[in-house]
Amino acid sequence: MELRQIRYFVTLAEELHFGRAAAREHIVQSALSQQIQRLERELGVRLLDRSTHHVALTPAGTAFLTEARQILDHVGRAKQTARNAGTSSPTLRVGIIDAGYDSMPQILRELQQRHPDLTIHQIEAGTPEQYRRLADGRLDIGIGRAYLTPPEVASEPIRFDPLGVLLPDDHPFADLDGVPVAALAGEVLLLGEEARTPEFNQFVVELCHAAGFAPTIYEGTVESTRAAADLVLHHRCLLCVPSSFRTSSRPGTVWRPLTEPAIRYPWSLLWHEANASPHVTAVIDSARRLARRLGWLEPGDPHVGSEVGG
């Protein structure tokens, strides 16, 4: 049994689609299929039920998946331990959702003031990808909404971020101090790529449903919120974003908070529960200090900070 076969199987179990799994592993689909077949022959059991349009785990596959993830997790931590021991300066791999948000950059500036010798690598990845990287040791700490976190991922709320809407500066909403959520019923909203930001998309959709309407979604996606701002500027759609994105929005657009109700988006730090690295602890401590100093977790409006839809 080869380690790559275990990794291929875990990826396929997560995607349940040979094409997407092969793309994630950067191999051709036929090679992925051959490796999975060899793994099944060695184990003497079928791990997957396959049909033309459907892939599903067998009971044996479900049982093997739990152990396979643990194997990859241990291997990832072993690799990082070896790398840390072999480098002259400590390193930290940090996940960020998008370079346009300022929460993690502020936390890292706080961290570097106290640990100037620490080398930090920022890795842009959506929350689902951060979960996978944290689980297999390719990421030390991340940030996102702690929604449906895997059992091995620990989290701590660090910021309740006012949610608002980015719009052209000549839009009628631009003259308002705040935009009632119900007023979005007549607008086209741009959501993020579902594979990257499913937790944020769900948050926005549930917010609209709670206000009594189903949102009209822009048909198309963009790779970053900076690119989304271009669509907003050209009156193609509006973009729901937390206040932490405001300072990097492009000229010609303005941000207005959502009201009735006011809502804050919950950001959390994410890390592997078994990762007791002093540098991960230092990030958490820095984030706590910053949150206290800037009031990131202070209560506000009765609706603020609550989870939409439960």
Image (spheres, rainbow, N blue to C red):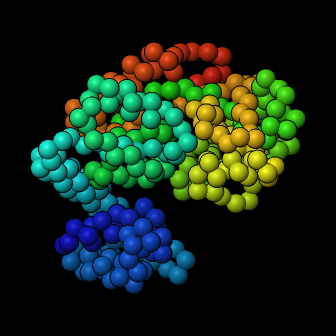
Q: Position of residue 19 (x, y in %)?
A: 48, 75
As drawn, is 81 to the left or to the right of 120? left
Residue at screen point 36% across, 43% down: 94
Residue 35 occupies which quadrant of the picture? Answer: bottom left
Q: Is residue 219 visible?
A: yes
Residue at screen point 49% across, 32% down: 103
Residue at screen point 74% across, 59% down: 219
* Viewer-closest of 223 and 24: 223
Q: Position of residue 5 (x, y in %)?
A: 27, 71
The quarter of the rendered structure image containing the N terminus is bottom left
As drawn, is 292 to the left or to the right of 257? left
Residue 149 occupies which quadrant of the picture? Answer: top left
Q: Is residue 146 above or below residue 216?
A: above
Q: How many labels were placed on the picture?
A: 0
Residue 153 occupies which quadrant of the picture? Answer: top left
Residue at screen point 79% across, 29% down: 179
Q: Position of residue 150 (x, y in %)?
A: 39, 45
The quarter of the rendered structure image containing the C terminus is top right
As drawn, is 295 to the left or to the right of 257? left
Q: Is residue 261 above or below residue 49?
A: above
As drawn, is 53 to the left or to the right of 88? right
Q: Position of residue 21 (x, y in %)?
A: 43, 70
Q: Is residue 265 visible?
A: no
